[in-house]
Image (spheres, rainbow, N blue to C red):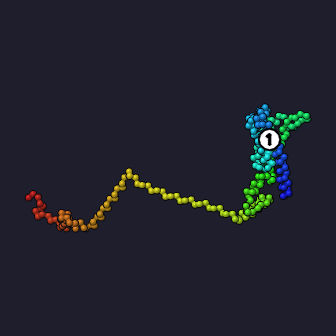
Amino acid sequence: MRSRSLVYDVAAALARLGVGVVFMAHGWRKIEAGVTATGENFDALGVPLPTAAAVYAAFVELLGGAALIAGLALPVTGALLFVDMVGAFLFVHADRGLFMVDGDRAQNGYELVVALGMAALLFAAGAGGRLTLDAWIVRKRAARPDEPRDEDDDEEDAESFVESLRQAELKFPETAPKPAEPPAEPAAPPAPKKAPSRRSAPKPAPEPAEPPAPPAGTEDDKPVAGRRKAAHRRRTGDTQPVKPPADGGAGAPS
């Protein structure tokens, strides 16, 4: 596994070297001819914004080729070079056929543009290998100042991380926390008492209870002279019989 990784890294470094040299050569040629002359050439070929396109193509090809060789910022470098080749394919080489040279005639086809563009896209996707400045910077940031690290430490760290995940999956059913019970709903607050309305009529006061009637036979004990005499007369009149008059009745004619 390690020998295959080393072979891949060496092959990727050689591929970056070859593609980067080709890009640098084309960029240097544009700068040597002059940005103005390159812009006029692009204008004649029908490229939109010829001056801006000439500046972009010259510096991206020159500096991007050097960055490919060094393996610096490969995702960004590869993407910029791929865009450069897409523009060259659409505005210059698309209608000239596949081959650069067809027989004795220079056809200026798109075979080189397609090959360089696909290689740049591959490097942008992460196929640059580990023999790059990007990988060296990452290892320097991850390494501790008092603990040196080897080239294969990244693989060992990845294997230990995967093993820890497996152990966690095996222990998860035993150590999984119980789901928390939902909190009890708070009791509803008591309804506020309604204040008495000022417009409501006041309740009538309760009537006093009537005094109990006196018992029978106690009516003579009242300190009223008239009623007592009348009652005494009624009792004496009831007990004594009335005698008829001697002359046959009072008021009778003689």
Q: Residue at x 77, y 40 (%)?
A: 58
In the depicted view, which residue is nearer to us: 229 or 85? 85
Q: Residue furthest top?
A: 44
221 up-or-down from 107: above or below = below
Q: Residue at x 79, y 50 (%)?
A: 71
Quadrant housing residue 195: bottom left
233 up-or-down from 22: above or below = below
Q: Residues within 10 Å of mark 1 (few under 14, many from 20)?
A: many
The residue carrying mark 1 is 27
x, y percent for residue 73: 75, 49
Location of the C terminus (image quadrant): bottom left
**Callout 1, which amino acid?**
Gly
- Left or right of residue 53: residue 198: left
In the depicted view, which residue is nearer to us: 122 or 139? 139
Quadrant housing residue 233: bottom left
Location of the N terminus (image quadrant): bottom right
- Mark 1: which secondary structure? helix
Q: Residue at x 81, y 48 (%)?
A: 69
Q: In this view of the protein, can residue 86 be seen by the observer?
A: no
x, y percent for residue 86: 78, 40
114 up-or-down from 2: above or below = above
x, y percent for residue 227: 20, 63
